[in-house]
Every structure is written in structure tokens, then in C-alpha cells.
Amino acid sequence: MSVSHLDSLEQSLAQRGWRVVAIHTGDGVRISASWEIQRSTKQPTLIIDFDGLEPDGGNCLPLEESYGCRLRGHAGFSLYFRRKMTSRREFWNADLESFLDALDEVAIRTE
């Protein structure tokens, strides 16, 4: 389910001027992978960690099966990869916009 969410997130980041400057491997437990993003070389990078803890506590899920992400170091700035069915698409879009707004807010504070 997550590949379309990842694509949507990456496209939405690009539309707001963000780019993924590096992709880092996860910790093998809770984090599937991390994206290092940056809007301007004059600003510090931000890290988005992708959730990958399996419900049974087994192996960490690969990035393509991640179920959400969060902005490292900023509690409460997270995005859950909810189903994108037609009836729920508006919720996904609203959640995505809120997450992007949070990224923009953090970027403004670090200028």
C-alpha cells in the first residue's frame, strides 16, 4: 500500500520546493528508512523517518511497506499512510497537507 503514498509524498515535497538529498537505511527495528530533505542549501536538512515496526515485533518492514512517517526531532509531526480509497482520499490529502505545513513551519523556524 505504501508505494503510492511514498510517490505522493515525494511529489508533494517537490511541489513545495523540497528535495530528497539522501536516503538512509533504517535501524532494522522501528525505522524502515529515512529521507534527508532540504529546501535550500542555506538551510539545514530535515530527516523524515519511515515507520516499519511489525505488529508482532519481528523484522522491520521495508520502506515500500512502511505505514507512516514522522519528522525526526519534532514530536507530533507525523503522517499515517491511510488507505486512499475514494471515500477516504480527502482525509489522506488533508493529512498530507498538514504534514507538509509542519515541515514548512519547521523550515521557517530554522532560517
Image (tube, rainbow, N blue to C red):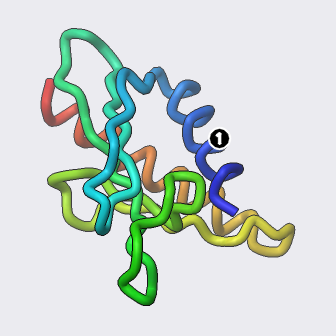
Identify the residue position indicated by label 1 in the image.
7
Image position of 37 with respect to 67: above or below: above
User: Residue 63's x, y, as percent?
Assistant: 50, 52
Question: At 23% across and 32% down in the image, what residue appears?
Answer: 108
Image quarter of the C terminus: top left
Q: Going by the picture, which residue comes out furthest to the bottom?
A: 56
Q: In this view, does 17 lie to the left or right of 35?
A: right
Question: At 75% across and 73% down in the image, what residue appears?
Answer: 88
Q: How crowded is mark 1: few (under 14 residues within 10 Å), some or many (20 or more)?
A: few
State the image quarter where residue 58 is shown. bottom left
In the structure shown, which secondary structural element does the residue marked by tag 1 occupy? helix
Of 84 and 97, the residue lying toward us: 84
Image position of 28 with respect to 105: above or below: below
Q: In this view, does 51 lie to the left or right of 9?
A: left
Q: How many labels does the image show?
A: 1
Q: Going by the picture, which residue comes out furthest to the top?
A: 41
User: Residue 46's x, y, as percent?
Assistant: 25, 36
Q: Is residue 76 left or right of residue 96?
A: left
Question: At 19% across and 10% down in the image, what residue appears?
Answer: 42
Question: At 33% across and 59% down in the image, what residue appears?
Answer: 31
Type of amino acid under label 1: Asp
User: Residue 79's x, y, as percent?
Assistant: 46, 62
User: Residue 22's x, y, as percent?
Assistant: 36, 26
Image position of 36 with respect to 57: above or below: above
Q: Going by the picture, which residue comes out furthest to the right?
A: 86
Image quarter of the N terminus: bottom right
